[in-house]
Amino acid sequence: MSRMKAVQVSKAGGNFEVVERNIPEPGRGQVRIKVEACGICHSDAIVKEGHWPTPIQYPRVPGHEIAGHIDAVGADVANWTPGQRVGVGWHGGHCFVCESCRRGDFILCQKGKITGLTHDGGYAEYMISPAEAVAAMPDELPAAEAAPLLCAGITVFNALRNAGARAGDLVAIQGIGGLGHLGIQYARQMGFRTVAIGRGGDKEPLARKLGAHAYIDISAGNPMNALQKLGGARVILATAPDSKSMSAVFDGLASNGKLLVVGASFDPLAITPLQLIHGRRAAQGWPSGSAIDSEDTLRFSALTGVRPMIERFPLERASEGFQHMISGKARFRVVLTTGA
Ligand SMILES: [Zn+2]
Ligand SMILES: [Zn+2]
């Protein structure tokens, strides 16, 4: 059996270790993917630190922004063949029999698997995935640019397209980081009047280059007033994981508007019942999506030219890449490449 390089965490709070492992064999209903690129996501900190409601089994190889190609298929896999370009995201498979699955809502599967958390992920040269978690990847997308679209990309794309906003509606993107810089591009390409909300005037040129029609600097005044001056937002996509900033923009919503939360934080939002009742407004969260949503994200990105801004690190330097991401210095997504 030949060997592969992988990066694992061997205990909660442990460091990333570069190790050699046997190349795993795909079982029934599984495929083996030759990883070409894997994005480093903020949620990889969950695996590193062990902050998850159910115990994580270690050692674990993190990584759920995987782009590569099918290398081998197990028994009973009908729809994938070796050589096909594919991606895998956070949603790592589902049971097909729970109530959510029976309703076709696979992302909410009660026994849902998570790539790089319930099973080994993409910080490796090869990984095994359940076949139902695999998305086809268009030829136009280079693997390193496709990788962040499998988590950051699908999350904002899928949230925005299901938000209830229609062409021409005002959609605000709060935060211009890993999620936000993609959110601005998607909102613009989906035909929304796109407003970027960031801290500081220096982010305005980038926001406009990404497609924002207008820019609101929260350090220059109350963002809620600025949004209301523009007519109020049908949707505010909250991407910066800062509950205070999210709460501060809520009153920038128009009637029937929705605060759509994708930036994950543990702190409570400060929104009163009256704020919800007034104007019949809502606050909602959005998880990423299933493999077919990933496929839609990749296809839409190829079609419209939406691309992540990335910094590349070789797989062996995963620890350094993770530090770069967690320090907030990355512009905007860090991607590990295997040289495949
Ligand atoms: Zn992620
Ligand atoms: Zn299920």
Image: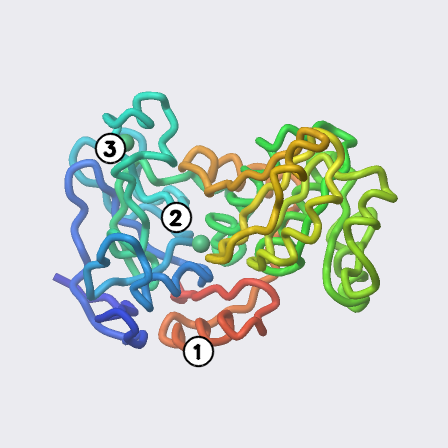
Q: Nearer the viewer, residue 221 or 261?
A: 221
What residue does disc 3 label?
Answer: 95
Kindly tell me whether residue 302 is visible in this rendering.
no
N-terminal-most mark, 1 or 2: 2
Give the residue type that dot 1 points to: Glu
* Residue drawn at (34%, 58%) of the image: 122
For numbered disc 1, what is the local secondary structure? Answer: helix
User: How many neighbours does mark 2 have within 10 angstroms: few (below 14), some (14-19), or many (20 or more)?
Assistant: many
- Residue, x 54% and y 62% (percent of image)? 333
Residue 306 location (% of width, % of height): 64, 47
| Residue 330 in the image, given as x and y percentages of width and height | 57, 70
Kindly state the secondary structure of the residue where label 3 is placed: loop
- Cβ atoms under marks 2 and 3 closer than 8 Å: no
Residue 334 location (% of width, % of height) = 51, 66
- Residue farthest left in this picture: 1
Mark 2 Cβ inside 8 Å of ligand 1: yes
Q: Is residue 11 left or right of residue 89?
A: left
C-alpha gap between disc 2 and disc 3: 15 Å
**For the point 28% across and 38% down, which residue is it?**
131
Name the residue tied to disc 1: 320
Q: Is residue 15 above or below residue 81?
A: below
Closer to us: 260 or 169: 260
Mark 3 nearby-residue class (10 Å; few <14, some 14–19, many ≥20): some
* Residue on which the image places disc 2: 90
Report the side of 56 relative to 282 (left or right).
left
Residue at disc 3, CB closer than 8 Å to ligand 2: yes
